[in-house]
Image: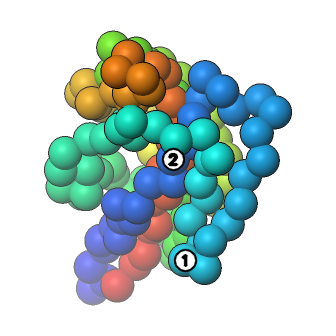
Amino acid sequence: MKTCFILLFSTLFYVSFSTAQGLAFQRDSSNILFSSVKQDQSASFDGLTTYLNTHVLYPELARKNGKEGEVSVWAVIGEDGQVKSVELASGMGFGCDEAVMEMILKMPQWKPSLRNGKNVSQKVLIRVQFRLQ
């Protein structure tokens, strides 16, 4: 019998939400997207990998159909550290997109991004991979 597990990327690609318009973004050699606007501190969530591993469910429809892939979502982390909105960046269907979006919306408080000593909103990209084994 196949054992199902979810491989989660704990790597977050940070992009400043409050100043996202009009910025030039570049990719470095490690394929990390970064902004030319420097943050004092980017939004963060301690134990992200553990949280994702224990809260995301592999949808039965995806498992039954042998579907594997990646779901990427943009999440807006507000000045108060709460997840304000989630937008699908790329999905794989079969209920996986909805499972990831629902889980991210229910996340506990993040450490908000700081700029010039003040909390600011930030948009982060979270990638979750679904793999059957």
The residue depicted at 25 percent of the width and 25 percent of the height is 109
Q: Residues within 10 Å of mark 1 (few under 14, many from 20)?
A: few
Circle on res. 10: none
Work out which quarter of the rendered image holds the C terminus and state it. bottom left
Q: Quadrant of residue 83?
A: top left
Q: First in sequence: mark 1 or mark 2?
A: 2
Query: Splitting the image into 4 quarters, where does residue 67 fall?
Result: bottom right
Residue 110 at what x, y percent from top left?
28, 30
Q: Secondary structure at mark 1?
A: loop
The amino acid type, in three-letter code, at marker 2 is Tyr
Q: Position of residue 58 (x, y in %)?
A: 38, 58
Left or right, 46 with reference to 126: left
Which image quarter holds the N terminus?
bottom left
Residue 48, compared with residue 43, is above or below; it is below
Up the image or down, 68 lies above or below 100; here it is: below
The amino acid type found where label 1 is placed reads Ser
Q: Which residue lies under the disc numbered 1?
A: 30
Residue 27 vs residue 1, the one in the foreground: 27
Number of residues whose C-alpha sits closer than 10 Å to that of mark 2, classed few (under 14), some (14–19) or many (20 or more): many
Taking depth in this image into account, of 32 and 49 the one nearest to the observer is 32
133, above or below 118, in the image: below
Asked whether residue 1 appears in the rendered view, the answer is yes
Spot occupied by residue 106 in the image (x, y as percentages of width and height): 33, 27
